[in-house]
Image: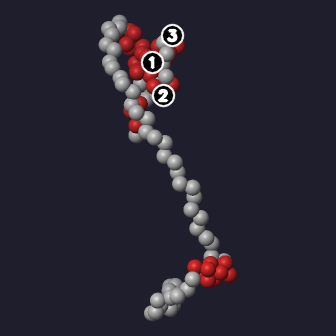
Amino acid sequence: MSTKPAFRNITEPLTVTDTDLDRLNQRMGVPTLVAGAPKQEEPPIAPRQQRPINILVPDYVAEAVREKAHKAKSSVRYIVLKALADSGIPVELDDLVLDARRAKA
């Protein structure tokens, strides 16, 4: 069983300057703490306005889109936006998220 080191009790307030403490720390090899630069937080991105587009497609198209999303481990929304972007409709890269539900977590 190990024994605890004996520490002296400090009964009176110490009148030691910071300079004296720094010299003692250097002599004893006490490492110093260096504060890192504060992290600059990026401003939150405001969510874009979104609206639903309701279209009717044949069952085989809906199944194919769902299957492609499943295989790509993405969302149907991503597959549709990617197809729209590939056809020349401007879609911003920030809106092309594989699965937005997982990106929020």
Q: Name the amino acid type tagged 1.
A: Leu
Nearer mark to the viewer, of 1 and 2: 2
Q: Position of residue 47 (x, y in %)?
A: 39, 31
Indicate whether 44 appears above or below 57.
below
Q: Residue at x 36, y 25 (%)?
A: 49
**Which label sits on residue 81?**
1
The CA distance from mark 3 to mark 2 is: 18 Å
Disc 3 element: loop
In this figure, which residue is indicated by the disc labeled 2?
Answer: 94
Q: Position of residue 8 (x, y in %)?
A: 50, 91
Return the residue nearer the eye: 84 or 74: 84
Precedes in sequence: disc 1 or disc 2: 1
In this figure, which residue is indicated by the disc labeled 3?
Answer: 87
* Left-right relation of 27 to 41: right
* Left-right relation of 67 to 40: left
Q: Residue at x 56, y 62 (%)?
A: 35
